[in-house]
Image (cartoon, coloured by chain):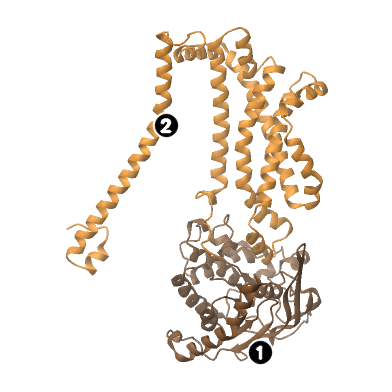
Amino acid sequence: MSGSEAPDQVQAVPGGNTVRTQALNEAAARAYSHSRLLATRDVLLSIFTPILLLALWEVAARCGWIDKKLYTPPTQIAVQGAKMVSSGEMWRNLEPTVLRLLIGFILGSVAGIIAGLLMGVSRVIRAALGPMFTALYALPKIAILPLLLLIFGLTETPKVLSVAISVFFILQINTLAGVVQIDERILEAARAYRATGWRLFRFVLLPGAIPSIFTGLQVAAGSGVIVVTAVEFVASNTGLGYLIWNSWQLFKPAQMYVGLIVVSIIGALLTGAIVLLERAIVPWRRANTLKRKKNT
Amino acid sequence: MSLAVIAPSGPPAFAVEGLSKMFSGRTGDVLALDDVTLELNEGSFTCIVGPSGCGKSTLLRILGGLETATLGTVTSRLRSVNSGLGNVRSTPETDTSTPKTDTSTPKTDTSTPKTDTSTPRTDTSARVAGSVPASAFVFQEHGVFPWFTVLDNVSFGIRMAGVGKTQRDKIARDWISRIGLDGFETAYPHQLSGGMRQRIAIARAFATGSPCLLMDEPLGALDAQTRMLMQEQLLRVWEADRKTVVLVTHQIEEALLLGDVVVIMSARPGRVKEIISVPFGRPRPADLEGTPEFAQLRQHIWNALRDEVRASMALS
């Protein structure tokens, strides 16, 4: 007889119950290991599916099923990438893109969060700026690049500003929504306990809006990558966007693929960093949402 | 109609006189409360029952200063615990601010944050908004802050009152243990059951040390069994402390089990229909609900309520 994991029950109910406890433990362990197995399978699938597709691509290109010139086989893309890294061409284009993206992203999101919070807190500011921002949000941010070029010339400023502006609106909207959507019952409780002014903001409004702010940051990360690439297509002779565009003009598909891959890696890394940051500062959201109430 | 109230005698904690509340909106005016007159003694446990929409929550919110009366007065003799200024926050016209000498703060409550006058942050500005309010609210579990741990939730009220961290942690831990949530100090509300979240809301109110607790259907969202356990727990905690409690409920049994006084309100517009003194002694016996007296009283209240509930159903 084992059952050392539940000595109380063994003593309280002698005999057959120990057997039952053991059976119970074993069944629970089986169920657990089964769920672990499924989780492992999910991870393996997520890794091997793209690898399989790449292998198919490679085989298809080498066997001539698809045009090798247009669909450069993955191994050749990798070789091209390695070449570009060692020649320094990669870094020459990676650095300006990352800088434009990060500076624009940080400027835009800080400004957007501040604007959203101010609009969330002050009815006057919300009334004054809300409709205007909504109208401006609908404007494609790329469309104002010519204007920015006109004003600032062919410098870094219009590129960074394009990113910042597109990020700004996303963050402003998400932050404002986060503040406005805080549960009325939470605000009532805060009011009943005399949370006012700065403390209301610090302990109630800000934490209440933070999940929504992080959603905005994630959306804005994708949007920022799009805008920085598009801007570099037309108004730059450095950066990954320029590299991709240039590869088209010079018909260098391998180089174009390298550019595309690096751009998507940048986007994934930025999004990943935001997710990690969210986990670090929003510990209460691990189960995502509060349980809904059952009745009223 | 008798306004006499048995139960712990003493000065009235609240005197409500001719209170009316009108809500104005685009769809017209709604008279929520009509000429409510009521006296609540200090240290008494009052339960308000009535059909839904009869304005009982509004009455509670006016008592606690979350809402202002359209007409009539609420005089509160309770004062803020640590300001010493009679800093009652209720309707403006009612703030009698009598610097009375009789100490209404419960002496038995060791957790009353007396020492916090030493904290440097309780300056004049903190006193206006920051003293421990005369009454603390218990809402349903949804009023618990999802971004705070149990400890931070329970200490929220005293934190807003400017109590220092060491002191408020001590008070909060004491209350967490009293409501049986030991070991959950660092848990977040979403990790807890509805009953546990409700206990957080109750502990948060008690922890403020406010002499009066205003509870708005605090157990309404709980299942029947949890609710019964919570009623017992609430009684135990209250009997050790004897704060003035006003509890809004839609359950007649709950009102009789917990209260010294049951106020029956009419359908909208809410008026006081009847005030019943509950004759059962304290601590309430465990088998109270099985006694014929209990059944009789419950029947009596239901008879009084039935027409009102019918009327309120016709209204909505």
Element carrying mark 2:
helix
* Residue B276 position by quadrant: bottom right
Q: Colour of chain B?
A: brown
The residue shown at (67%, 53%) is A205
Q: CA distance from mark 2 to mark 1?
A: 72 Å
Question: With respect to residue B25, does B45 lie above or below?
Answer: below
Q: Residues within 10 Å of mark 2 (few under 14, many from 20)?
A: few
Which residue has dot 2 on it? Answer: A46
Nearest the viewer among A91 and B36 is: B36
Question: With respect to residue A206, does B276 lie above or below?
Answer: below
Nearest the viewer among B163 and B194 is: B194
Which residue has dot 1 on it? Answer: B10
The spot of residue B173 in percent (x, y) is 53, 66
Residue A161 is marked as none
- Tell me whether marks 2 and 1 sit on the same chain: no
The residue shown at (37%, 40%) is A39
Question: With respect to residue B251, does A265 lie above or below?
Answer: above
The residue shown at (58%, 54%) is B147
Please give left or right for residue B211 compared with residue A78 in the image. right
Question: With respect to residue B156, does B32 lie above or below?
Answer: below
Q: Residues within 10 Å of mark 1 (few under 14, many from 20)?
A: few
Q: Colour of chain A?
A: orange
